Image (cartoon, rainbow, N blue to C red):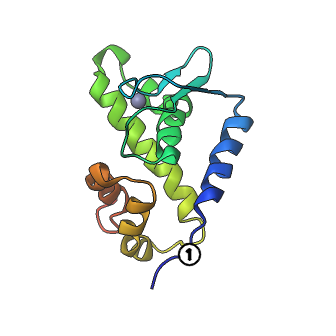
Amino acid sequence: MSYDFKSNASREYLENIIDLNHITIIHLSGTTYDPDVVNIQKKAIIINNNYQSNFSYEFRIAHELAHLLCTTSSENYNLSLLTKNDIEKQANIDGIQLLINFYFSEIASGKLRWNYRFQFISTFGLGPLTHLVEKILNPIKNSV
Ligand SMILES: [Zn+2]
């Protein structure tokens, strides 16, 4: 049994968040080594069409959106104590959470969500972040 999910609907969901928050998204064609970037002051996401990434386009957008939208949680910390790794990890967690909110919008059961986790991971190319997805979706120990 598999969970029927329309993946192009997730692009509309993300585009909606982008519009509602007056965020600008720019697509560039850089080299395969130039990662996507975000400019927080200008509320802009810059996606490199040629960037070589195993992550899905949707997760790449969700990750950059997380940098723009989820800054309140990091305001509780002394920013100078946060390393780049901490910031990237938090954007991964918040980006995964954004996709979970949409992907599992019709599945309230934590146990069912957990059972569908590999389908979620493969839909968004999240293989390298399996440990984070499992921490977030774990119905028993729900802490990251
Ligand atoms: Zn990032």
Query: Where is residue 44 drawn, in percent x and y?
Result: 60, 22
Q: Ligand 1 near label 1 (Cβ, under 8 Å)?
A: no
Above or below residue 89? Residue 13 is below
Q: Is residue 115 or residue 127 the one in the foreground?
A: 127
- Image position, residue 127 (x, y; %): 30, 54
Quarter of the image for residue 41 reads top right
At 30% across and 30% down in the image, what residue appears? 86
Q: Is residue 112 toward the left or the right of residue 68 in the image?
A: left
**Ligand number 1: quarter of image:** top left
Q: Nearer the viewer, residue 144 or 33?
A: 33
Q: Residue shown at 38%/29% (left/top)?
A: 32
Res. 144 visible in picture: no
Secondary structure state at the residue bearing disc 1:
loop
The answer to whether one can see residue 89 in this image is yes
Query: Is 89 left, or right, of 1 in this rendering?
Result: left
Q: Does residue 38 appear to the left or right of 53 in the view shown?
A: right
Image coordinates of residue 94 in percent, x first then y, are 45, 43
* Image spot of residue 46 (x, y percent): 55, 25
Which residue is rendered at x = 62% and y = 15% of the image? Answer: 42
For label 1, count other residues whose C-alpha is less than 10 Å away and answer few (under 14), some (14-19) or many (20+). Answer: few
Q: How many marks?
A: 1
Image quarter hosting the N terminus: bottom left
Residue at 45% in and 48% down: 56
Residue 134 to residue 116: above or below: above
Q: Amino acid at mark 1?
A: Asp
Q: Nearer the viewer, residue 49 or 8?
A: 49
> For mark 1, what is the residue?
4
Q: Residue furthest bottom?
A: 1
